[in-house]
Amino acid sequence: MTEFTGFPSRMTFTPVPNLVFSSLLPQITDIAELKVLLHIFEIIYPKKGSLKFTSLNEMLGNAGLVNDLTGQAKDILPEALAALVKKGILLTLPVKTGTAADQIYLFNNETNRLSIERLLKGEMVLPGLSAEKPATVPAEAPADIFTLYEQNIGILTPLIADELREAVKQYPEGWIREAVKEAVSLNKRNWRYIARILEHWATEGRDDGTHRGNLKKNTDPDKFIKGRYGHMVQR
């Protein structure tokens, strides 16, 4: 390996959000995932247009990325991308270029989530690409509430993990799953909204006839209002 000789006086830059350093780096322990994430910033940033994305085939053709993955990109890259999607950092959508299958990747933000919905509904078109509906996922629930949150809402921060642990102590697990489902259906993908749904069910009962009497013992309906995270959940 050639020794680095220092930064030149003039060079180009790729912006990286501060959130990467404060929230994402603690979650990424695999060096391949980190390399892939940084290369995606580099690939996507210079692109024009309102919807910026990269694709699996584009990344496999990126010499810098392939070299960083020690020449095993065809094996390592899909695994790293899948891990970044599971962590809620990236969004993905299967597409076709003509008859060739590919997969596009976007950063997980509200604009891109809405864009994927529009692509699937046919309300938005990507030049040269046709969106494919993702493969049907079995109906069984994820193994735990943390997985449920990551798959449907977003990044599981330490603060949110603490909130979920407290919620499991206070509410039936089925309530939490249904609250997440309702938040997703309304495109309100945040813990504050889910907590408000649970609080409402705890105090007013549910429309399906499940009443607050079915809550676990020692439930305080105002748990998420009066607690240390109360500033996040306003009535």
Image: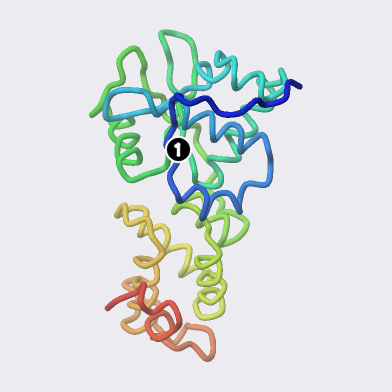
Which quadrant holds residue 117? Answer: top left
Q: Please tell me how crowded label 1 is: few (under 14), some (14-19), or many (20+) other residues with Cα within 10 Å.
A: many
Compared with residue 120, is residue 194 higher up or lower down, i.e. above or below?
A: below
Compared with residue 10, is residue 156 higher up or lower down, i.e. above or below?
A: below
Instruction: Choose between 215 and 161: the one closer to the eye.
Output: 161
- Mark 1 sits on what residue? 91
Which quadrant holds residue 62? Answer: top right
Q: Is residue 118 left or right of residue 96?
A: left
Q: Residue furthest front?
A: 9
- Residue 46 is situated, as x and y percent measured from the top left of the image, at 37, 24
- Residue 103 is situated, as x and y percent measured from the top left of the image, at 49, 24
- Residue 110 is situated, as x and y percent measured from the top left of the image, at 32, 45
Which quadrant holds residue 194? Answer: bottom left
Compared with residue 134, is residue 166 higher up or lower down, i.e. above or below?
A: below
Q: Residue furthest left?
A: 123
The residue at 52%/54% (across/down) is 23
- Residue 174 is situated, as x and y percent measured from the top left of the image, at 50, 68
- Point out the image quarter for the N terminus: top right
Instruction: Choose between 139 and 196: the one closer to the eye.
Output: 196
